[in-house]
Image (tube, grey):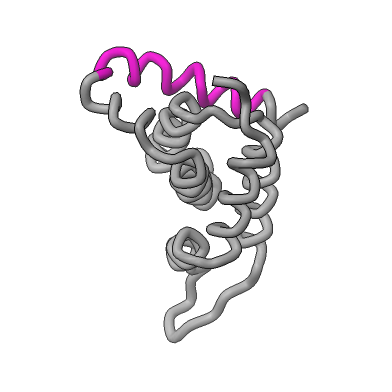
């Protein structure tokens, strides 16, 4: 339920930006659904990583634009959001003390797990045109 509210909020937030600059973002609706899901998940990853910041606000608005262009049920986004949370919860270490959330989001966005899930969800949760 909470994720549906988040999705609704993101959609409402992005709707104004999307409407004001429709020609610029019109091409999003031409992307395959699995690609829209991957881009949405990447934006959500950055939004969660930088919670309560300008970056988070921008990432949520961007995720909302991908969501608005998508044609899959909310359950697909909920499942991807759970994957994002799991990715960000894994501790990471390196030569510099950091959470490495950007690295986690980039690797997640380029990884096979997200690719497989987005392809599966785009078919499993497809809505009627």
Q: Position of residue 109 (x, y in %)?
A: 47, 59
Q: Is residue 8 magenta?
A: yes
Q: Quadrant of residue 95?
A: bottom left
| Location of residue 73 by image quarter | top right
What residue lies at 50% left-to-right and 17% top-to-bottom? 12
Front-most of residues 4 and 110: 110
Q: Position of residue 29 (x, y in %)?
A: 38, 28
54 or 77: which is nearer to us?
A: 77
Picture residue at 69% right of the left edge, 26% below the top: 4
Query: Residue 92, image x and y in percent?
Result: 57, 75
Q: Quadrant of the N terminus?
A: top right
State the residue at coordinates (63%, 47%): 80
Q: Residue furthest right?
A: 1
Q: Is residue 32 left or right of residue 108?
A: left
Q: Is residue 124 above or below residue 23?
A: below
Tell me the quadrant of the picture where the C terminus can be found: top right
Please state if 107 lies on the left or on the right of 81 as rendered: left
Q: Is residue 35 left or right of residue 24?
A: right
In the rendered image, which quarter is residue 90 located in? bottom right
Residues shaded magenta? 5-22
Residue drawn at 69 percent across, 40 percent down: 124
Label total for image: 0
Q: Is residue 78 magenta?
A: no
Of residue 60 and residue 36, the one placed in the foreground of this image is 36
Residue 7 visible here:
yes
Q: Is residue 115 above or below residue 63?
A: below
Q: Residue 121: where, in percent of width, then height?
A: 64, 44
Above or below 91: residue 84: above
Residue 50 visible at all: no
Identify the main secondary structure in magenta: helix
- Would you place residue 53 above or below residue 117 in this image? above
């Amino acid at each position: 339920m909470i994720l549906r509210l988040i999705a609704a909020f993101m959609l409402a937030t992005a709707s104004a930006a999307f409407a004001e600059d429709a020609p610029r973002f019109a091409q999003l609706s031409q992307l395959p659904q699995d690609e829209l899901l991957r881009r949405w998940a990447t934006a959500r990853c950055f939004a969660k990583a930088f919670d309560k910041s300008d970056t988070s606000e921008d990432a949520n608005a961007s995720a909302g634009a991908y969501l608005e262009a998508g044609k899959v049920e909310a359950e697909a986004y909920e499942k991807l959001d759970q994957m994002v949370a799991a990715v960000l919860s894994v501790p990471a270490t390196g030569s510099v003390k950091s959470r490495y959330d950007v690295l986690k989001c980039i690797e997640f966005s380029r990884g096979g797990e997200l690719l497989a899930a987005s392809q599966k969800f785009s078919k499993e949760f497809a809505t009627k045109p």
